[in-house]
Amino acid sequence: MRLGHRAALAALFLLVAAVSPNASGGGEADGDALLRRVAKRYGGVKTLSAQFRQEVPLENVGIVRKAAGTVYFQRPLRMRWDYRVPGKQLFLADGESFYFQPPDSTRVFRRKIDEGALGGRIPLLLLFGKGDITDYFRVEKAFPLEGRKETALRLVPKGDGAPEVKRVDLVVDDAGLAIREIHLYDHLGGSNHLFLDDIVIDPALPADHFRFRESPGVEVVDG
């Protein structure tokens, strides 16, 4: 799976960014209640931006692929990942299609958004479409991180609503009430680690920020 697609899968939890330090010391029951409150609180968020750093271990070759850049979201079903490291690339959703351009590539890959299947293949858009995260995930464990003034929430899928995901660990800053880390694990032993800074809720974004612009010499490939 490409870095862009892995980041998109993890980004399901970018809007889950308001954990109260007084509410996070319990276990599964407290964690599920917290997740419901967070989902309700951020149901009205229209846009979001953040700086991200991503690490994807490739166990079979013993290396870690690293990337960094800026991510933007807008309801409904719009997102934009501008990668700066290791090279310039783009992963974009304009509300109808996904677009992905690898580094130094003259091709852009386009795929239609299937909102009916978002709970499975691309669960991040539950928070930017019409779904409810608590219908697909429950909190298995919630606990404060020693010495870090942060709280961890371990989420697991309910039923087969998110078949690609084995579990997701969130790390939340208690003082700033923002998610700082997202750790996603799949059933094939793969993992994706996303670190977030400078999160802004409801930033003003240009009207065409999520519009794909064709460039001369670049071929758009459907599939």
Image (cartoon, rainbow, N blue to C red):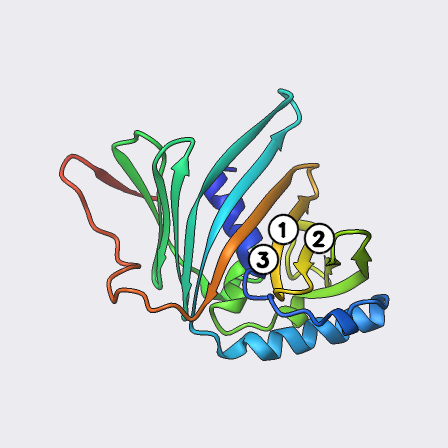
**Kind of residue indicated by mark 2:** Asp
**Position of 27 relative to 82 (above/below):** below
Q: Confirm or deny contact between disc 1 and disc 2 (CB under 8 A).
A: yes
Look at the numbered disc 3 and give the secondary structure of its residue: loop
Q: Nearer the viewer, residue 196 or 158?
A: 196
Counting residues from the start of the chain, the first of labels 1 and 2 encountered is 2
Q: Nearer the viewer, residue 198 or 205?
A: 198
**Position of 17 relative to 181 (above/below):** below
Which quadrant is home to the C terminus?
A: top left
Number of marks in the rendered image: 3
Which residue lies most toward the left here? 216
Q: Nearer the viewer, residue 203 or 29?
A: 203
The label shown at residue 120 is 3
Q: Position of residue 6 (x, y in %)?
A: 53, 44
Q: Position of residue 155 (x, y in %)?
A: 73, 59
Q: Position of residue 191 (x, y in %)?
A: 65, 40
Look at the numbered disc 1 and give the secondary structure of its residue: strand
Report which residue position mark 2 lands on. 169
Q: Quadrant of residue 84?
A: top left
Report which residue position mark 1 lands on. 181
> What is the C-alpha distance between the residues marked 1 and 2?
8 Å
Which residue is painted at 67% across and 78% down in the image? 37
Which residue is painted at 43% across and 53% down in the image? 71
Look at the numbered disc 2 and give the secondary structure of its residue: strand
Q: Nearer the viewer, residue 66 or 10?
A: 66
**Kind of residue indicated by mark 3:** Gly
**Position of 103 relative to 125 (above/below):** above
Could you classify mark 2 by the number of other residues whose Cα lies within 10 Å: few (under 14), some (14-19), or many (20 or more)? Answer: many
Q: Quadrant of residue 178?
A: bottom right
